[in-house]
Image (cartoon, grey):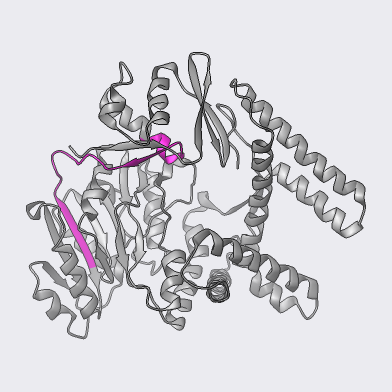
Amino acid sequence: MTEITYALGKRVRIVEHDCSCVLVMSYPLKAIRLPSAVSGLFRHLADNKESSLEELCQRVTGVGTLALEDFLHRLEKAGWVTSNGLRPLAPLPAVSIIVPVRNRPQEIRACLTSLLSLSYPEGKREIIVVDDASDDETPNVVEAFPVTLHRMRERHGASSCRNWGARHSHGEILCFLDSDCLADAAWLDELLPVFRNPAVAAVGGLVDSHDDRTVLDRYEKVKSSLHMGSHPTDSSMGNRFFYLPACNFAVRREMFFDVGGFRESLEVGEDVDLCWRITNEGGIVEYRPAARISHKHRNTLWPFCKRRFDYGTSEPLLQELHPDRIKTFVLWPKAVIFWALCAATALTGAWILGIMAAAWLLLDTVIRRREVARLGVTLNFLLPLAAVLRSNASFLFHCSSFVSRYYLVCATLLTPIFPLVGAVAWTLHFGVGTVEFYAKRPRLNLISFLGFFSLEQISYQAGVWFGCFRDKFFLPLFPRVSMRTVVESEGIDRQ
């Protein structure tokens, strides 16, 4: 058994209340009352930087190791705790690793070399390479490795190759890796234990950048479309648009064939489509960033822009295929009122509106503070005030990101007629880019980051607009609008 250790989240503290205790998270501001049965466990975590699962089991009664691990795992995805380590599957499942390739001799050599160095037992894995009618030395390179090679006579695309490899595999878990990726030695050891939860149908890991030689490499390292973040999460957390990229993806064999595998008519977005069909069947898709691979991104400008354009064209097609996932632009009622008052103040110069905006902030702060007080916790007034300010700033970022992602080109074209439209759109765009820069902390300067960020946004939205006109389907550009209702089961849990 590999030891698992847990610690409280960075922004989490414990507040004692009667015989139990309350966990309070400062950002986002939320609080939960803990059952008295596990209060001792969290007091122990507060007194110790890190504790093993076995130590924590001794702090509770009537709860088995697996049940406690599942409980802590759910808290981890919500940000209350962090973990390190894992317990392997027992017995280890047979795994089929499927790699589609076309005309990439050097990349597939490096990829297969990394796969043969996996720490997962050799007798429990098979490696299947499906060559998509390469017309160079790629098949000869593959034949030099102890793997199974299938050669397609005609080009069919990556999705078809993945499905072909799956049909000719034997593993109970199907793992997909792209030919321009390198797997860490512990890739499968980190990926597969998630399947101990029978509700999990598929899992994926972190897609890191392989190179950092150029400024574009360093941009991709923090802003790649394949990079899904550094925190574990899954499709059960309320995000109906959650998906994982196919270049680092594992799925139960039965589920894969139940949903029909990858949709071969899709050249891009096939991984999004597959994840959505899996969740439609009730399976959970989980993200585990510890299961790391490195990806050789397109590090010249034209391929970089072309790939973003292609991703954009998939939006209308995916929404047509999944009408239950039509894009919705969510408005946060309290933030809408605050920014409406701010805008009215700026446009009219009426100071009374500015006072109303400030009063609205204070009222929201008092409400949040009282909601936490119901759990027996009295917060310093500055903590809920900071949460209110962050919430309103987040909503502004949310709106600005939508403009930057979908309307920057359109606003620019309208600038000769409506100069203010272009000025506002580019101001919001550069605001979003600047926030991203300081959040991601890339190893390049702000000007270079904003340049690549602008190219990415313009390329992607050009693809979306092209796809919408091609398919005569415009909901990605004009989504439904809804007001967000905040549901609070324990304490507060807000945007």
Q: Is residue 494 above or below residue 47?
A: below
| Residue name at image x 31 percent, y 65 percent | 294
- Residue 67 pos. (x, y %): 31, 27
The residue that appears at 42% across and 30% down in the rendered structure is 46
Across and down, in percent, residue 369 comes to 67, 30
Q: Is residue 349 left or right of residue 446?
A: right
- Residue 138 % position (x, y): 18, 80
User: Which quadrant is home to the C terminus?
Assistant: top right
Between 41 and 346, the one nearer to me in the picture: 41
Q: Is residue 163 magenta?
A: no
63 sits left or right of 350 in the view: left
**Where residue 118 sits: x, y (%)?**
16, 58
Indicate left or right for 285 with 140 as reference. right
Q: From the viewer's perspective, is 87 left or right of 38?
A: left
| Residue at 75% across, 77% down | 415
For this rendering, which residue is in front, 238 or 340?
A: 340
- Identify the image quadrant of the N terminus: top left
Judge whether residue 285 can be spotted in this image.
yes
Name the image quarter holding residue 76.
top left
Indicate whether residue 76 is drawn in magenta. Answer: yes
**Which span is picked out in magenta?**
73-99
The correct choice, above or below, for 234 with respect to 208 in the image is above
For this orientation, the residue located farthest to the bottom is 136
